[in-house]
Amino acid sequence: MNILVTGGAGFIGSHMAKRHLADGHRVVIVDDLSSGRTERLPREARFVEADIAETDLAPLLSEEKIDFVSHHAAQIDLRHSVSDPIGDARANIIGSLKLFEAMRRAGTKHVLFASTGGAIYGEPEGGRPATESHPTNPVSPYGCAKLSIEKYMHYYRVVHGLSTRVFRYANVYGPSQDGTGEAGVVAIFSEAMLGNRPLKINGTGEQTRDYVFVGDLVEAAARASRSEKSGVWNLGTGVETSVHRLFELLAKEYGYTATPPHVPAPAGEQMRSVLDGSLVRRDFELPPWTRLEDGLKKTADWFRSRHRG
Ligand SMILES: NC(=O)c1ccc[n+]([C@@H]2O[C@H](COP(=O)([O-])OP(=O)(O)OC[C@H]3O[C@@H](n4cnc5c(N)ncnc54)[C@H](O)[C@@H]3O)[C@@H](O)[C@H]2O)c1
Protein backbone atom coordinates (compact mmCIF):
# COMPACT_ATOMS: atom_id res chain seq x y z
CA MET A 1 0.00 0.00 0.00
CA ASN A 2 0.94 3.64 -0.33
CA ILE A 3 0.45 5.31 3.06
CA LEU A 4 0.45 9.00 3.96
CA VAL A 5 1.33 9.72 7.60
CA THR A 6 0.46 13.25 8.69
CA GLY A 7 2.48 14.29 11.73
CA GLY A 8 5.09 11.66 10.86
CA ALA A 9 7.92 13.75 12.35
CA GLY A 10 6.12 13.55 15.68
CA PHE A 11 6.41 10.99 18.45
CA ILE A 12 3.57 8.60 17.53
CA GLY A 13 3.45 9.34 13.79
CA SER A 14 7.13 8.46 13.34
CA HIS A 15 6.59 5.08 15.03
CA MET A 16 3.63 4.50 12.70
CA ALA A 17 5.70 5.42 9.64
CA LYS A 18 8.53 3.07 10.63
CA ARG A 19 6.16 0.16 11.17
CA HIS A 20 4.40 0.68 7.84
CA LEU A 21 7.80 0.76 6.11
CA ALA A 22 8.85 -2.41 7.92
CA ASP A 23 5.64 -4.05 6.70
CA GLY A 24 6.71 -3.29 3.12
CA HIS A 25 4.49 -0.27 2.41
CA ARG A 26 5.57 2.94 0.71
CA VAL A 27 5.31 5.89 3.12
CA VAL A 28 4.94 9.63 2.53
CA ILE A 29 5.13 11.94 5.53
CA VAL A 30 3.58 15.40 5.75
CA ASP A 31 4.58 17.51 8.74
CA ASP A 32 5.10 21.23 9.35
CA LEU A 33 7.76 20.53 12.01
CA SER A 34 5.92 22.73 14.53
CA SER A 35 6.58 20.15 17.25
CA GLY A 36 8.04 17.39 15.08
CA ARG A 37 11.75 16.75 14.54
CA THR A 38 13.58 15.79 11.36
CA GLU A 39 15.78 13.29 13.25
CA ARG A 40 12.66 11.15 13.73
CA LEU A 41 12.01 10.88 9.98
CA PRO A 42 12.81 7.46 8.55
CA ARG A 43 15.18 7.78 5.57
CA GLU A 44 13.09 5.47 3.39
CA ALA A 45 10.02 7.73 3.59
CA ARG A 46 9.38 10.72 1.33
CA PHE A 47 9.08 13.84 3.47
CA VAL A 48 6.96 16.86 2.51
CA GLU A 49 7.17 19.85 4.82
CA ALA A 50 3.72 21.41 4.84
CA ASP A 51 1.06 22.79 7.16
CA ILE A 52 -2.09 20.71 6.66
CA ALA A 53 -4.28 23.71 7.53
CA GLU A 54 -2.77 25.70 4.64
CA THR A 55 -2.06 23.05 2.01
CA ASP A 56 -4.27 21.30 -0.52
CA LEU A 57 -3.03 17.73 -0.29
CA ALA A 58 -5.18 16.41 -3.16
CA PRO A 59 -2.36 16.65 -5.76
CA LEU A 60 0.04 14.77 -3.45
CA LEU A 61 -2.56 12.08 -2.69
CA SER A 62 -3.16 11.58 -6.42
CA GLU A 63 0.48 11.74 -7.47
CA GLU A 64 1.54 9.24 -4.80
CA LYS A 65 -1.56 7.06 -5.33
CA ILE A 66 -2.19 7.07 -1.59
CA ASP A 67 -4.45 4.21 -0.40
CA PHE A 68 -4.43 4.90 3.33
CA VAL A 69 -3.97 8.02 5.46
CA SER A 70 -2.71 7.78 9.03
CA HIS A 71 -3.72 11.17 10.40
CA HIS A 72 -1.52 12.11 13.35
CA ALA A 73 -0.72 15.79 12.70
CA ALA A 74 -2.17 17.96 15.46
CA GLN A 75 -1.64 20.72 17.93
CA ILE A 76 -1.46 18.36 20.92
CA ASP A 77 -0.93 20.67 23.87
CA LEU A 78 -4.13 20.77 25.89
CA ARG A 79 -3.05 23.81 27.91
CA HIS A 80 -2.09 25.66 24.75
CA SER A 81 -5.59 24.94 23.40
CA VAL A 82 -7.00 26.74 26.45
CA SER A 83 -4.85 29.84 25.89
CA ASP A 84 -5.31 29.79 22.07
CA PRO A 85 -8.50 27.91 21.17
CA ILE A 86 -8.64 29.48 17.72
CA GLY A 87 -5.09 28.42 16.88
CA ASP A 88 -5.93 24.93 18.15
CA ALA A 89 -9.08 24.78 15.98
CA ARG A 90 -7.09 26.00 12.97
CA ALA A 91 -4.50 23.23 13.22
CA ASN A 92 -6.86 20.50 14.39
CA ILE A 93 -10.30 21.14 12.90
CA ILE A 94 -9.43 23.09 9.74
CA GLY A 95 -6.32 20.98 9.13
CA SER A 96 -8.36 17.76 9.34
CA LEU A 97 -11.20 19.12 7.21
CA LYS A 98 -8.78 20.17 4.49
CA LEU A 99 -7.29 16.68 4.57
CA PHE A 100 -10.70 14.95 4.32
CA GLU A 101 -11.74 17.24 1.46
CA ALA A 102 -8.49 16.45 -0.33
CA MET A 103 -9.13 12.73 0.20
CA ARG A 104 -12.64 13.06 -1.21
CA ARG A 105 -11.38 14.84 -4.32
CA ALA A 106 -8.43 12.51 -4.84
CA GLY A 107 -10.55 9.39 -4.25
CA THR A 108 -8.48 8.21 -1.24
CA LYS A 109 -10.80 5.98 0.76
CA HIS A 110 -9.10 4.92 3.98
CA VAL A 111 -8.16 6.99 7.02
CA LEU A 112 -7.10 6.34 10.60
CA PHE A 113 -7.40 9.30 12.96
CA ALA A 114 -5.48 9.80 16.22
CA SER A 115 -8.18 10.95 18.61
CA THR A 116 -8.08 11.06 22.39
CA GLY A 117 -9.92 9.20 25.13
CA GLY A 118 -9.18 11.23 28.24
CA ALA A 119 -9.90 14.67 26.80
CA ILE A 120 -13.14 13.51 25.16
CA TYR A 121 -14.68 11.53 28.03
CA GLY A 122 -13.71 13.77 30.94
CA GLU A 123 -13.80 12.18 34.42
CA PRO A 124 -14.89 8.52 34.00
CA GLU A 125 -18.48 8.07 35.16
CA GLY A 126 -19.41 5.18 37.44
CA GLY A 127 -15.82 4.54 38.51
CA ARG A 128 -15.07 2.12 35.68
CA PRO A 129 -12.74 2.44 32.67
CA ALA A 130 -14.57 4.38 29.95
CA THR A 131 -15.86 2.29 27.05
CA GLU A 132 -16.44 3.79 23.60
CA SER A 133 -20.08 4.50 24.57
CA HIS A 134 -19.11 6.63 27.59
CA PRO A 135 -20.65 10.13 27.37
CA THR A 136 -18.37 12.59 25.62
CA ASN A 137 -17.96 15.75 27.69
CA PRO A 138 -14.75 17.50 26.64
CA VAL A 139 -13.74 20.37 28.90
CA SER A 140 -10.92 21.72 26.72
CA PRO A 141 -10.79 23.23 23.23
CA TYR A 142 -8.43 20.35 22.31
CA GLY A 143 -11.05 17.75 23.35
CA CYS A 144 -13.82 19.69 21.55
CA ALA A 145 -11.71 19.77 18.38
CA LYS A 146 -10.95 16.03 18.47
CA LEU A 147 -14.63 15.20 19.01
CA SER A 148 -15.77 17.45 16.19
CA ILE A 149 -13.21 15.83 13.84
CA GLU A 150 -14.72 12.46 14.76
CA LYS A 151 -18.16 13.83 13.84
CA TYR A 152 -16.86 15.11 10.49
CA MET A 153 -15.44 11.64 9.87
CA HIS A 154 -18.89 10.18 10.47
CA TYR A 155 -20.26 12.58 7.86
CA TYR A 156 -17.53 11.66 5.35
CA ARG A 157 -18.15 7.97 5.94
CA VAL A 158 -21.94 8.13 5.55
CA VAL A 159 -22.13 10.66 2.74
CA HIS A 160 -18.87 10.18 0.82
CA GLY A 161 -18.07 6.54 1.57
CA LEU A 162 -14.77 7.13 3.40
CA SER A 163 -13.61 4.14 5.42
CA THR A 164 -12.81 5.63 8.84
CA ARG A 165 -10.96 4.31 11.86
CA VAL A 166 -10.95 6.48 14.97
CA PHE A 167 -8.36 5.51 17.57
CA ARG A 168 -9.01 7.19 20.92
CA TYR A 169 -5.63 7.05 22.61
CA ALA A 170 -5.05 7.04 26.36
CA ASN A 171 -1.75 8.57 27.60
CA VAL A 172 0.85 7.32 25.18
CA TYR A 173 4.50 6.85 26.14
CA GLY A 174 7.58 5.28 24.61
CA PRO A 175 10.95 5.89 22.94
CA SER A 176 11.50 9.22 21.16
CA GLN A 177 8.77 11.08 23.03
CA ASP A 178 9.53 14.72 23.61
CA GLY A 179 10.25 15.75 27.19
CA THR A 180 10.58 19.43 26.48
CA GLY A 181 6.91 20.34 26.12
CA GLU A 182 3.89 20.24 28.40
CA ALA A 183 2.72 16.83 27.25
CA GLY A 184 4.20 13.45 28.06
CA VAL A 185 4.96 13.06 31.75
CA VAL A 186 7.05 9.91 31.19
CA ALA A 187 9.39 11.81 28.87
CA ILE A 188 9.52 14.87 31.13
CA PHE A 189 10.36 12.76 34.20
CA SER A 190 12.88 10.70 32.20
CA GLU A 191 14.85 13.70 30.99
CA ALA A 192 14.85 15.37 34.40
CA MET A 193 15.90 12.19 36.20
CA LEU A 194 18.67 11.39 33.74
CA GLY A 195 20.00 14.94 33.97
CA ASN A 196 19.60 14.73 37.76
CA ARG A 197 17.54 17.90 37.61
CA PRO A 198 14.77 18.81 40.05
CA LEU A 199 11.24 18.11 38.94
CA LYS A 200 7.86 18.87 40.39
CA ILE A 201 4.59 17.05 40.76
CA ASN A 202 1.39 18.86 39.81
CA GLY A 203 -1.38 18.72 42.41
CA THR A 204 -1.67 15.87 44.90
CA GLY A 205 0.12 13.34 42.68
CA GLU A 206 -2.86 11.03 43.20
CA GLN A 207 -4.42 11.91 39.84
CA THR A 208 -4.45 8.83 37.62
CA ARG A 209 -3.88 8.19 33.94
CA ASP A 210 -3.91 5.14 31.70
CA TYR A 211 -0.42 4.78 30.19
CA VAL A 212 -0.31 2.87 26.91
CA PHE A 213 2.92 1.86 25.18
CA VAL A 214 3.42 3.29 21.69
CA GLY A 215 4.36 -0.17 20.35
CA ASP A 216 0.84 -1.39 21.16
CA LEU A 217 -0.69 1.47 19.14
CA VAL A 218 1.54 0.66 16.19
CA GLU A 219 0.52 -3.00 16.23
CA ALA A 220 -3.17 -2.02 16.34
CA ALA A 221 -2.73 0.46 13.48
CA ALA A 222 -0.87 -2.09 11.34
CA ARG A 223 -3.76 -4.53 11.75
CA ALA A 224 -6.43 -1.83 11.26
CA SER A 225 -4.79 -0.75 8.01
CA ARG A 226 -5.19 -4.31 6.66
CA SER A 227 -8.83 -4.49 7.72
CA GLU A 228 -11.96 -3.10 6.06
CA LYS A 229 -13.53 -2.23 9.43
CA SER A 230 -14.69 1.32 10.16
CA GLY A 231 -15.32 2.32 13.76
CA VAL A 232 -14.26 4.02 16.97
CA TRP A 233 -11.88 2.23 19.33
CA ASN A 234 -10.24 3.05 22.65
CA LEU A 235 -6.51 2.38 22.82
CA GLY A 236 -6.00 2.08 26.54
CA THR A 237 -5.06 -0.63 29.00
CA GLY A 238 -7.84 -0.24 31.60
CA VAL A 239 -5.14 0.19 34.27
CA GLU A 240 -4.97 3.43 36.27
CA THR A 241 -1.62 4.65 37.52
CA SER A 242 -1.13 7.66 39.77
CA VAL A 243 1.58 10.23 39.12
CA HIS A 244 3.18 9.18 42.42
CA ARG A 245 3.35 5.56 41.31
CA LEU A 246 4.75 6.54 37.91
CA PHE A 247 7.35 8.69 39.64
CA GLU A 248 8.33 5.76 41.89
CA LEU A 249 8.70 3.34 38.96
CA LEU A 250 10.83 5.77 36.95
CA ALA A 251 12.92 6.87 39.96
CA LYS A 252 13.79 3.20 40.55
CA GLU A 253 14.62 2.72 36.87
CA TYR A 254 16.98 5.74 36.76
CA GLY A 255 18.26 5.61 40.37
CA TYR A 256 16.83 9.07 41.10
CA THR A 257 16.66 9.89 44.79
CA ALA A 258 15.40 13.50 45.12
CA THR A 259 11.93 14.11 46.54
CA PRO A 260 9.90 16.32 44.22
CA PRO A 261 7.89 19.26 45.58
CA HIS A 262 4.20 19.56 44.78
CA VAL A 263 2.93 22.59 42.88
CA PRO A 264 -0.72 23.55 42.32
CA ALA A 265 -2.41 21.55 39.58
CA PRO A 266 -3.48 23.50 36.49
CA ALA A 267 -7.11 24.68 36.79
CA GLY A 268 -9.58 22.07 35.57
CA GLU A 269 -7.08 19.19 35.46
CA GLN A 270 -8.83 15.82 35.40
CA MET A 271 -8.37 13.64 38.48
CA ARG A 272 -8.87 10.34 36.69
CA SER A 273 -8.62 8.99 33.19
CA VAL A 274 -8.79 5.33 32.21
CA LEU A 275 -10.00 3.60 29.05
CA ASP A 276 -11.48 0.18 28.42
CA GLY A 277 -9.51 -1.11 25.44
CA SER A 278 -11.14 -4.52 25.13
CA LEU A 279 -13.02 -3.74 21.90
CA VAL A 280 -9.92 -2.98 19.84
CA ARG A 281 -8.18 -6.08 21.19
CA ARG A 282 -11.15 -8.24 20.20
CA ASP A 283 -11.77 -6.64 16.78
CA PHE A 284 -8.12 -6.77 15.67
CA GLU A 285 -7.04 -9.84 17.68
CA LEU A 286 -4.34 -7.92 19.50
CA PRO A 287 -1.96 -9.43 22.04
CA PRO A 288 -2.26 -8.25 25.69
CA TRP A 289 -1.25 -4.65 26.41
CA THR A 290 2.39 -4.14 27.34
CA ARG A 291 2.75 -3.99 31.13
CA LEU A 292 3.72 -0.52 32.33
CA GLU A 293 6.90 -1.80 34.00
CA ASP A 294 8.02 -3.44 30.74
CA GLY A 295 7.16 -0.45 28.56
CA LEU A 296 8.93 1.91 30.95
CA LYS A 297 12.08 -0.24 30.78
CA LYS A 298 12.14 -0.03 26.98
CA THR A 299 11.48 3.70 27.16
CA ALA A 300 14.19 4.26 29.78
CA ASP A 301 16.69 2.29 27.65
CA TRP A 302 16.03 4.69 24.79
CA PHE A 303 16.36 7.81 26.95
CA ARG A 304 19.59 6.43 28.47
CA SER A 305 21.10 5.69 25.06
CA ARG A 306 20.23 9.19 23.87
CA HIS A 307 21.59 10.76 27.05
CA ARG A 308 24.93 9.01 26.50
CA GLY A 309 24.89 10.66 23.03
N1 LIG B 1 0.75 11.52 23.02
C1 LIG B 1 -0.42 11.17 23.55
O1 LIG B 1 -0.51 10.72 24.69
C2 LIG B 1 -1.68 11.33 22.75
C3 LIG B 1 -2.90 11.02 23.37
C4 LIG B 1 -4.08 11.16 22.63
C5 LIG B 1 -4.02 11.56 21.29
N2 LIG B 1 -2.81 11.86 20.73
C6 LIG B 1 -2.81 12.30 19.33
O2 LIG B 1 -1.84 11.56 18.60
C7 LIG B 1 -1.29 12.39 17.57
C8 LIG B 1 0.23 12.41 17.65
O3 LIG B 1 0.61 12.93 18.91
P1 LIG B 1 2.12 12.97 19.40
O4 LIG B 1 2.12 12.71 20.86
O5 LIG B 1 2.95 12.13 18.52
O6 LIG B 1 2.46 14.51 19.20
P2 LIG B 1 3.65 15.24 18.40
O7 LIG B 1 3.53 16.70 18.71
O8 LIG B 1 4.94 14.57 18.65
O9 LIG B 1 3.21 14.98 16.90
C9 LIG B 1 2.35 15.81 16.19
C10 LIG B 1 3.02 16.13 14.85
O10 LIG B 1 2.13 16.92 14.07
C11 LIG B 1 2.87 17.97 13.45
N3 LIG B 1 1.92 19.05 13.18
C12 LIG B 1 1.27 19.83 14.07
N4 LIG B 1 0.47 20.71 13.44
C13 LIG B 1 0.63 20.47 12.10
C14 LIG B 1 0.08 21.05 10.93
N5 LIG B 1 -0.80 22.07 11.01
N6 LIG B 1 0.47 20.57 9.73
C15 LIG B 1 1.38 19.56 9.65
N7 LIG B 1 1.92 18.97 10.71
C16 LIG B 1 1.55 19.42 11.93
C17 LIG B 1 3.95 18.33 14.46
O11 LIG B 1 5.05 19.00 13.88
C18 LIG B 1 4.30 16.96 15.01
O12 LIG B 1 5.35 16.36 14.27
C19 LIG B 1 -1.94 13.76 17.73
O13 LIG B 1 -3.05 13.85 16.86
C20 LIG B 1 -2.41 13.75 19.17
O14 LIG B 1 -3.51 14.62 19.36
C21 LIG B 1 -1.64 11.76 21.41
Image (spheres, rainbow, N blue to C red):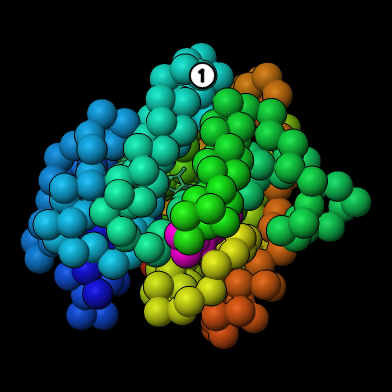
The residue that mark 1 highlights is 85
Q: Residue at x 41, y 31 (%)?
A: 94
Q: Quadrant of residue 198?
A: top left
Horizontal relation, residue 41 to residue 14: left or right: left
Q: Position of residue 92 (x, y in %)?
A: 43, 34
Residue closer to the observer: 263 or 1: 1
Q: Is residue 163 magenta?
A: yes
Horizontal relation, residue 139 to residue 17: left or right: right
Q: Position of residue 65 (x, y in %)?
A: 18, 64
The total number of labels drawn is: 1
Q: Is residue 194 visible?
A: no
Q: Residue at x 67, y 72 (%)?
A: 279
Q: If the picture is divided into quarters, which one holds ligand 1?
A: top left
Q: Residue at x 61, y 72 (%)?
A: 280
Horizontal relation, residue 260 to residue 96: left or right: right
User: At numbered mark 1, what does the secondary structure look like: helix, strand or loop?
Assistant: helix
Above or below, 195 relative to 80: below
Q: Position of residue 235 (x, y in %)?
A: 58, 62
Q: Residue at x 63, y 49 (%)?
A: 117
Segment colored magenta: 162-168
- Amino acid found under the numbered disc labelled 1: Pro
Q: Position of residue 105 (x, y in %)?
A: 30, 49
Picture quarter with the N terminus: bottom left
Residue closer to the observer: 267 or 301: 267
Which class describes the residues within 10 Å of circle 1: few (<14), some (14-19), or many (20+)?
some
